[in-house]
Amino acid sequence: MLCEITLEAGYLRVELFNRHTAEDTRQALAAITGEARKHRCSQVLISVHASSPIFKVEQSGILDCFRGFGEPSTYRIALTANSEELRLSHQYLESIARRAGINVRSFSSEQAALHWFTDRRWLPDRRQGRESWENTERREHRRRRSREGVRLA
């Protein structure tokens, strides 16, 4: 198994090759979690190549490793694969992880995953701006016009 981890602008890129056993998966995820904590990186792109699909999620320990990243609302894990079989296993993993409250998504391309990372709707700091609006009135109170005051053309 080969696991290449590089720090990119705003995310951690992981290239995973020839992962075939549950032990390989646990070792790779331990390395990924360690690097994410070390660099304080909340977005991780994991690209899997020439590997066996994972359908025994509990046995592989993936969910426990993903929980090790921290608070689910602050991190995002994107998965890509180079084969249809791997992509199906990633979709299965995504559905199980999301039910467990873990922010994991499977993508058909790296470009789509990177777009998810930059999508403003998902940025954690965007939600912090709501606090300043909570106690203020958003609109002015204007006197409403009556029906008689409106002319129809």
Image (cartoon, rainbow, N blue to C red):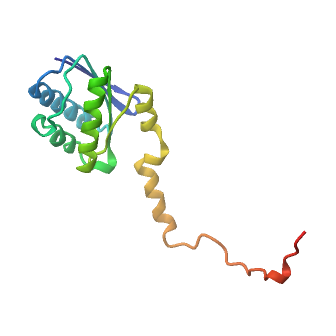
The image position of residue 85, as x and y in percent, is: 27, 24
Say which residue appears at 26% left-offset and 35% top-offset.
36
The image position of residue 149, as x and y in percent, is: 85, 80
Say which residue appears at 47% left-offset and 61% top-offset.
130
Say which residue appears at 15% left-offset and 42% top-offset.
64
Q: Is residue 121 left or right of residue 29?
A: right
The image position of residue 108, as x and y in percent, is: 39, 28
Nearer to me, 107 or 2 = 107
Q: Is residue 65 left or right of residue 5?
A: left
Q: In the displayed structure, would residue 6 be above or below residue 103?
A: above
Say which residue appears at 84% left-offset and 83% top-offset.
148
The image position of residue 95, as x and y in percent, is: 28, 43
Residue furthest right in the image = 153
Q: In the displayed structure, would residue 151 be above or below residue 113?
A: below
Q: Quadrant of residue 25?
A: top left
Nearer to me, 15 or 148 = 148
Q: Is residue 144 left or right of residue 107?
A: right
